[in-house]
């Protein structure tokens, strides 16, 4: 026996699980301290953790458990402490995995290595600092605890009934923590059935335990699904076989594929490890099959326990995957349960070959796993910075601004952070996330806020009275939540424009369109006090132009009031597309010249029925970096790609024509006029170019496109340049 083995054998039974718990928590704190030990928040945490700090915790019916964690942690008044509670569940998972492996693997060091490797594997890297999104990690920790209790009881043959009842209770608690655990109350019954199969339980458990527990679990699962706050949401869940199969593939492969881009070595190593584990498990399966069928070489007691743990993990993993199998958008955090249970199950099955392995080899395997665990943490940390590093850096700037200026913001003020290219945000520009994030930054719950990219400022930001949720924050058909909307007209407003490479900004004025002119709101002013009267002076050079869609043409910045409707085109061209070729269109307009490009399209054959979304349909007459036009059954859909906003143009007459006007001042501003309204576009819209006659994938359009270009100032032939060639940059 080695010196290391002697030292570990002298430790009491609870010591190593306790050490694993502490090591896991400390490791996550060390590698994630910038994200955890700060007021950095992402997505739903922006609202729920901030509400907790102000003692306004709001629970969700389908999984209230995580909100009780927020409520408890918020008693300290520290967002960092609340976020750090997530690490408790990582530590518990490591400790419980170690205990599950106790009857399976003799080497304590190897058990510890397996537990740490599974717990640190780089899947869903935002789980340690995303508390409301870490519900799968919370649920896994609880179910691992239940499995450890049942496994140890079956191994010792004592207090089995108490363990099975306790497992049901723990599974129900996990059910209340995470929607991924909606089916988990059924697990203890199926574990008992697995115990009967491997000869660790009598058949009486099938009737007197399994049947009642399964009925209870089915009832709870149905209730959970009915109360889930996503169940009634459009396009959130679906049940076609293809989607379920696709989600299963994602659950298994996504953790590896996410490593492929930036962590090629880890992708190769872990993919190879997965194949090795599957291979060893296949060998174990052959051995088990021979034992059951030919009754040769009966399974030893440890092998029965290994088979039980393998089956139990397969059951738990399948039940945890079940609810997310119907998700229309399979998020990487749904893979957490599959990775944990699959890894533990394969480790249990593969361990059948360990009894014949030399102790030094086991020590070597354990050492490799411990080193790999440290590598896991390094990869997790790097991946977290890749995902949220920019947002963290931007948060630090906003935090500094709040620390500097919060005392200057009057009661009931509202604060807007506009972000330039290269910055990052986790609020999505949404009012409820933004407002509570700003409140957390400033430590005041009287503020309103908006945080988002400058290109999202395309809606009227003002509402009659603020509330976190309401129809005023959605588009007309309730398919998209509006960004950068949620200010009140009578609140003092402070706007900060953060640009990469610039010094910490001061509050700036904002210009809003009002008819045919702009009005300017200085820092600290209200929109109501400014009114809509034409200002007497020029718009300050530092003012940010907020560009919501407006009825009619927008006239500003030196372009005449009748612009662009009365312009006489200087270049008119018509292109007939047969549905196969591309026309690459660009316009080289001099800097500062007012221009308009009218595009009129008429399909060769009118659409007569519904159009499905396939690789070839719907037909797309036009595609650019900024917009995409598709023909539907009764309208044309124009998607503004920067914001995701959809503009619908009802077919113009029996010939189903459409008309779009792109206009502006070259290099300064650009708008799209469609359906009676103007919408902001990137200033580079014509320089970047448009594809005419074809769109995404193999979607083409047969018809006639007429382009009419009008330009003020110097005119040079060839400004409107159309080539019949493919431009891969616009794919």
Image (cartoon, grey):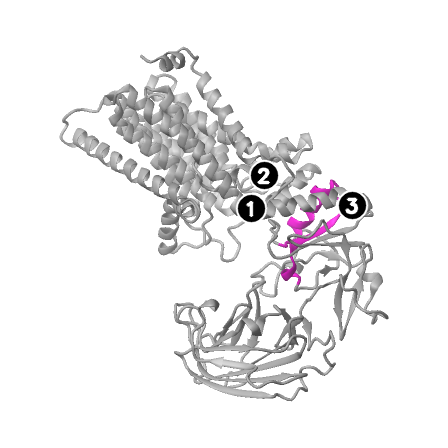
From the image, tell me which residue sits under label 1.
388
Total of numbered circles in the picture?
3
Res. 35 mark? 2
Of label 2 and label 1, which has the lower sequence position? 2
The answer to whether marks 2 and 1 mark residues whose Cβ atoms lie closer than 8 Å is yes
Of label 3 and label 2, which has the lower sequence position? 2
Front-most of residues 696 and 469 = 696
Q: Which residues are magenta?
A: 429-457
Q: Residue at x 49, y 43 (%)?
A: 383
In the picture provided, is 609 more to the left or to the right than 500? Answer: left
The answer to whether marks 1 and 3 mark residues whose Cβ atoms lie closer than 8 Å is no
The stretch drawn in magenta includes residue 97? no
Above or below for 251 versus 205: below
Residue at mark 3 to residue at mark 2: CA–CA distance: 23 Å
From the image, tell me which residue sits under label 3.
405
**Can you see residue 197?**
yes
Find residue 369 and report its image quarter. top left
Task: Check disc 2 and report its element: helix, strand or loop.
Answer: helix
């Amino acid at each position: 026996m080695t010196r290391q083995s002697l030292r570990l054998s002298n430790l009491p039974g609870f010591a190593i699980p306790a050490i694993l718990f502490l090591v896991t928590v400390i490791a996550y704190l060390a590698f994630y301290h910038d994200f955890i030990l700060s007021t950095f928040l992402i997505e739903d945490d922006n609202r729920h953790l901030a509400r907790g700090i102000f003692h306004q915790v709001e629970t969700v019916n389908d999984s209230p458990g995580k909100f009780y964690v927020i409520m408890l942690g918020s008693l300290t008044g520290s967002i960092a402490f609340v976020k750090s509670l997530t690490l408790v569940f990582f530590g518990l998972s490591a400790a419980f995995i170690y205990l599950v492996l106790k009857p399976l693997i003799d080497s304590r060091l190897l058990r510890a290595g397996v537990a740490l490797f599974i717990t640190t594997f780089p899947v869903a890297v935002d789980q340690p600092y995303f508390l409301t999104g870490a519900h799968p990690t919370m649920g896994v920790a609880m179910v691992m605890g239940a499995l450890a209790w049942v496994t140890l009881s079956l191994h010792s043959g004592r207090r089995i009934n108490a363990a099975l009842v306790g497992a049901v209770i723990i599974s129900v608690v996990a059910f209340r923590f995470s929607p991924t655990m909606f089916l988990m109350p059924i697990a203890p019954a199926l574990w008992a059935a697995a115990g009967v199969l491997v000869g660790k339980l009598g058949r009486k458990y099938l009737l007197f335990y399994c049947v009642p527990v399964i009925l209870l679990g089915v009832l709870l699962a149905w209730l959970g699904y009915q109360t889930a706050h996503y169940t009634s949401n459009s396009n959130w869940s679906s049940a076609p076989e293809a989607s379920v199969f696709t989600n299963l593939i994602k659950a298994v492969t996504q953790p590896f594929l996410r490593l492929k881009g930036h962590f090629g070595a880890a992708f190769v190593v872990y993919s190879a490890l997965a194949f090795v584990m599957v291979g060893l498990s296949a060998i174990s399966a052959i051995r088990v099959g021979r034992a059951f069928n030919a009754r040769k070489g009966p399974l030893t007691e440890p092998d029965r326990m290994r088979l039980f743990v393998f089956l139990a993990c397969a059951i738990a993993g399948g039940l945890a995957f079940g609810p997310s199998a119907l998700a229309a958008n399979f998020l990487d955090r749904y893979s957490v349960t599959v990775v944990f249970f699959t890894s533990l199950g394969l480790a249990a099955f593969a361990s059948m070959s360990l009894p014949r392995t030399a102790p030094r080899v086991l020590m070597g395997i354990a050492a490799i796993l411990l080193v790999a665990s440290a590598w896991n943490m390094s990869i997790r940390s790097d991946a977290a910075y890749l995902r949220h590093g920019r947002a963290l850096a931007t948060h630090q700037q906003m935090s500094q601004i709040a620390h500097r200026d919060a005392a200057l913001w009057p009661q009931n003020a509202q604060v807007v952070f506009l972000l330039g290219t290269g910055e990052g945000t986790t609020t999505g520009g949404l009012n409820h996330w933004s407002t509570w994030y700003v409140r957390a930054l400033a430590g005041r719950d009287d503020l309103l806020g908006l945080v988002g990219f400058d290109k999202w400022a395309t809606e009227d930001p003002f509402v009659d009275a603020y509330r976190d949720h309401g129809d005023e924050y959605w588009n007309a058909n309730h398919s998209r939540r509006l960004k950068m909307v949620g200010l009140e007209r009578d609140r003092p407003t402070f706007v900060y424009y953060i640009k990469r490479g610039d010094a910490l900004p001061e509050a700036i004025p904002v210009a809003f369109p009002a008819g045919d002119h702009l009005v300017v709101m200085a820092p600290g002013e209200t929109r109501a006090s400014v009114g809509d009267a034409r200002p007497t002076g020029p718009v300050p050079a530092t003012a940010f132009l907020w560009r919501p869609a407006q009825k009619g043409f927008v006239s500003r910045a030196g372009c005449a009031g009748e612009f662009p409707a009365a312009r006489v085109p200087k270049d008119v061209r018509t292109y007939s597309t047969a549905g196969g070729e591309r026309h690459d269109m660009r316009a080289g307009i001099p800097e500062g010249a007012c221009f308009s490009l009218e595009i009129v399209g008429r399909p060769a054959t009118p659409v007569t029925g519904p159009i499905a979304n396939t690789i070839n349909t719907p037909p797309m007459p036009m595609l650019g970096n900024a917009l995409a036009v598709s023909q539907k059954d009764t309208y044309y859909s124009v998607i503004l790609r920067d914001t995701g906003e959809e503009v619908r143009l009802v077919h113009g007459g029996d010939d189903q024509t459409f008309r779009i006007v792109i206009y502006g001042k070259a290099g300064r501003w650009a708008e799209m006029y469609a359906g009676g309204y103007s919408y902001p576009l990137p200033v580079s819209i014509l320089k970047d170019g448009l594809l005419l006659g074809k769109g995404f994938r193999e979607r083409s359009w047969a018809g006639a496109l007429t382009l009419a270009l009008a330009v003020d100032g110097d005119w040079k032939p060839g400004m409107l340049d159309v080539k019949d060639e493919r431009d891969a940059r616009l794919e």
